[in-house]
């Protein structure tokens, strides 16, 4: 019996030793594995909310300040969502070029799902076959060079109408934000639905739509607190905007369907608007892609909102910088005056001969990118960026605002100097990463080639026809350029000017 007891003790001792050895091995393997995974530097975070408190009311600026401490890429925890923030051209290039396919999806966002029919538009839909088909439709059918060119008369007509209204307003204070909003809204309406619509009503509805994207949805980042969105009313507010927009879109589509019933199907392509084209694609069964009604409405809505919002914002910032910098304004006015040769208006053909105008617009976009943080991306697989390991499912934010103001890339980075864009190779194609007003890679903005002619034509004619000063004796150099952060970056206060004719 004693021998049995001794044997039992020995076995228990050996078993205990084996458990200890296994425990140590597991710990060592786990520790070694963690050491081999290199995670980007991160600021300290708080329970539940993570790093949200560090974003503040100016996330672009605050993320820039954090990047100066933690590096070109850093990992934040936004609620339960790990978020990679890129604040340098090199980091942006790795994400949007080297590993573009790994980072070309979108995170699921509550507001986008409500407002865009389950994120069925091109901007927020996740990467996959559906998105690729939508992108093909946008690039080949809606925004091809031929299609954009076909709307030249629309642009020239509406810019001419705007100039006429401004001539009638000379000597009075003019809200240029409102002017640019009406101009871009009318151009988008004529290109999208074939006619002007109720301007103030539609503008107000689209403003509410865009503003909903700036409403913070707790459920998008802390899913177990999604009920809070219901309690505070943000979900219902978004649903109401979505309902009103859906009614508007249904009326537009039904109007076009009824019109087509009595039309010759061999209509002139240049006379077709976006809705006509999308309805034809919806009925075309030979493409192998079924464009559902919700997808059609999401695309129309994106054309309205994105086309109006970014163009209007870019025009206001560009004109504000010109007014604030009289040297640049004088130089641009000299260029467009020489091109116009005393004609009543500058035409789109003239825009090929105004390099300084193009440099002015690029410089304004450098300092004031329409989407300062671009739209968020999502990694689809584990990937290594700048030596750091990034897990699949990580949200990615690219701070285009910070990159455009990086003193390592741009001499006198906060000064407005269009000359830096003369005689260089920077284009709107998204092939460079120190200038990213419209992103790059697969998820770059496809609408830039529609918006750019509007910006160039409107700005050229306004500075050609008018001199501008600020009201109430404010010096032009003292113009308030405070930013108001949102999904697009507006001036905090609208641009108010006194206009006078130049000739």
Image (tube, grey):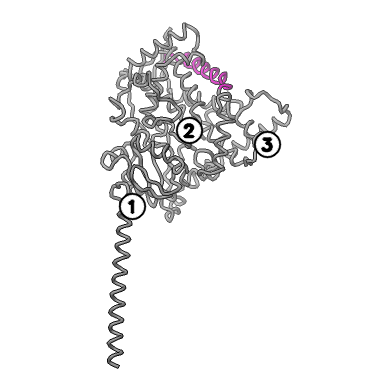
- Count residues near mark 3 (Cα–Cα under 10 Å), then give few for <14, some for 14-19, many for 20+: few
Say which mark, if any, is on residue 284: 3
Q: CA distance from mark 3 to mark 2?
A: 26 Å
Give the residue at x 56% y 43%. 129
How many marks do you count on the picture? 3
Per the image, the residue denoted by label 2 is 445
**Closer to viewer: mark 1 or mark 2:** 1
According to the picture, the residue beneath numbered tag 1 turns out to be 37
- Secondary structure, mark 2, is loop
Q: Which mark is residue 56?
A: none
Mark 3 or mark 2: whose residue is earlier in sequence: 3
Q: Which residues are magenta?
A: 149-171
For the point 37% across and 27% down, the residue is: 366
Seen in the picture, residue 215 relative to 344 is either above or below; the reply is below
From the viewer's perspective, is residue 24 above or below residue 47?
below
Q: Pointer 3 and pointer 2: residues touching (CB < 8 Å)?
A: no
Marks 1,2: beta carbons within 8 A: no
Q: CA distance from mark 3 to mark 1?
A: 50 Å
> What quarter of the picture does the N terminus occupy?
bottom left
Say if residue 499 shows up in the picture.
yes
Secondary structure at badge 1 equals loop
| N-term mark: 1 or 2 | 1
Which one is earlier in the sequence, the residue at label 3 or at label 1?
A: 1
Q: Main secondary structure of the magenta part?
A: helix
Determine if residue 471 is in view. no
């Amino acid at each position: 019996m004693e021998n049995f007891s001794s044997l039992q003790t020995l076995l228990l001792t050996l078993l205990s030793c084996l458990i200890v050895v296994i425990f140590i091995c597991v710990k060592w393997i786990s520790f070694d594995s963690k050491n081999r995974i290199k995670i980007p530097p991160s600021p300290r975070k708080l329970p539940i909310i993570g790093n949200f408190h560090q974003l503040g009311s100016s996330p672009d600026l605050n993320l820039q300040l954090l990047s100066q401490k933690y590096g070109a890429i850093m990992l934040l925890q936004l609620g339960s969502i790990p978020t990679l923030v890129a604040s340098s051209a090199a980091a942006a290039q790795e994400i949007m070029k080297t590993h573009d396919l790994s980072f070309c999806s979108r995170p699921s966002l509550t507001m986008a799902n409500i407002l865009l029919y389950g994120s069925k538009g091109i901007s927020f839909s996740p990467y996959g076959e559906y998105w690729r088909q939508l992108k093909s439709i946008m690039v080949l059918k809606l925004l091809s060079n031929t299609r954009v060119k076909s709307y030249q008369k629309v642009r020239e007509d509406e810019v001419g109408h705007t100039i006429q209204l401004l001539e009638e307003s000379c000597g009075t204070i003019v809200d240029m934000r409102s002017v640019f909003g009406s101009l871009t809204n009318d151009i988008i309406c004529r290109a999208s639905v074939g006619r002007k619509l109720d301007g103030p009503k539609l503008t107000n509805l689209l403003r509410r739509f865009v503003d909903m994207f700036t409403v913070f949805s707790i459920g998008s980042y802390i899913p177990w607190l999604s009920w809070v969105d219901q309690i505070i009313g943000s979900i219902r507010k978004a649903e109401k905007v979505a309902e009103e927009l859906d009614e508007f879109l249904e009326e537009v589509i039904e109007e076009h369907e009824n019109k087509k019933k009595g039309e010759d199907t061999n209509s002139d392509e240049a006379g077709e608007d976006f809705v006509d084209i999308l309805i034809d694609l919806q009925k075309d069964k030979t493409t192998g892609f079924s464009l559902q009604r919700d997808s059609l409405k999401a695309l129309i809505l994106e054309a309205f909102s994105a086309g109006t919002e970014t163009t209007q914002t870019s025009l206001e910032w560009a004109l504000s910088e010109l007014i604030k910098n009289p040297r640049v304004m004088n130089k641009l006015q000299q260029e467009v005056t020489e091109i116009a040769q005393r004609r009543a208006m500058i035409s789109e053909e003239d825009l090929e001969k105004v390099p300084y105008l193009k440099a002015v617009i690029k410089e304004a976009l450098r300092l004031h990118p329409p989407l300062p943080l671009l739209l968020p991306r999502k990694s689809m697989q584990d990937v290594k960026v700048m030596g750091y390991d990034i897990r699949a499912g990580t949200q990615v934010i690219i701070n285009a605002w910070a990159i455009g103001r990086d003193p390592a890339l741009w001499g006198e980075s906060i000064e407005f100097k269009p000359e830096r864009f003369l005689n260089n190779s920077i284009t709107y194609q998204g092939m460079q990463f120190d200038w990213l007003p419209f992103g790059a890679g697969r998820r770059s903005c496809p609408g830039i080639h529609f918006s750019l002619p509007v910006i160039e034509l409107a700005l050229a004619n306004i500075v050609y026809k008018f001199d501008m000063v600020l009201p109430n004796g404010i010096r032009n150099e003292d113009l308030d350029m405070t930013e108001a952060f949102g999904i697009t970056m507006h001036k905090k206060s609208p641009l108010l000017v006194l206009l006078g004719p130049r000739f």
